Amino acid sequence: MQPLKYLGGYPPEVQARVRELIAQDRLGTVLSAKYADAHAVRNDGQLYTYVQALKDRHMRKAAPLGKVVFDGKLQVMKHALGTHTTISRVHGGRLKASREIRIASVFRDAPADFLRMIVVHELAHMKEADHNKAFYQLCTHMEPDYHQLEFDLRLYLTHLDAMREQSRSD
């Protein structure tokens, strides 16, 4: 039995239910029924505008964003779905900081709710570096269904892995 890498911290009964849905080839159908809405964010410019709108709505006083891009290497190389970085550069006699958010390119084709969840997650890191209580409170302030979306995103990634495995074995 192959481990469910995105669901490792969940109880065995939850993992058993997910394995059952995969065996019945129903996990994708369940997720498609729940998350049918696609998003229109297709390129880096649109992603920047989307992230900036969320930031302006919930985090007006946070430092400005310098760059927001889809990153095709992110999931494989960093084992992450999004990253936030602050890059400091010397500009004349001053130190200039630029904040960047990179979103894994898997979200280019993911349901709209999952893109919003990962953007909220990365924006929250602009204020809270660690995954602590304050971090998750900020996430749920920006997205009230954050925890459910995070779980369903893990199901979605599990489904994508199962589809890749199935296509390799065919």
Image (tube, rainbow, N blue to C red):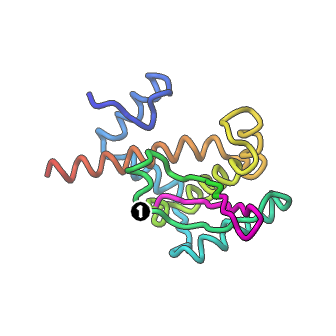
Residue extending farthest right: 61
In the foreground, 59 or 33 = 59
Residue extending farthest top: 12
In the foreground, 141 or 43 = 43
Left or right of 145, for residue 82: left
The correct choice, above or below, for 42 with respect to 14 in the image is below
Residue 104: percent from left, percent from top: 48, 58
In the foreground, 169 or 119 = 119
Residue 22: percent from left, percent from top: 33, 41
Residue 90 shown in magenta: yes
Quarter of the image holding residue 114? bottom right
* Mark 1 burial class by Cα count in 10 Å: few <14, some 14-19, many 20+: some
Q: Residue drawn 79% across and 65% down?
A: 56
Q: Residue drawn 85% across and 59% down?
A: 61
Residue 54: percent from left, percent from top: 73, 63
Residue extending farthest front: 93
Q: Secondary structure at mark 1?
A: loop
Left or right of 118, for residue 8: left
Residue 40 shown in magenta: no
Quarter of the image holding residue 97? bottom right
The correct choice, above or below, for 94 with respect to 159 in the image is below
In the foreground, 112 or 119 = 119
Which amino acid type is shown beneath numbered disc 1?
Gly
Total marks in image: 1
Query: Magenta residues, as a range?
Result: 88-104
State which quarter of the image contains the N terminus: top left
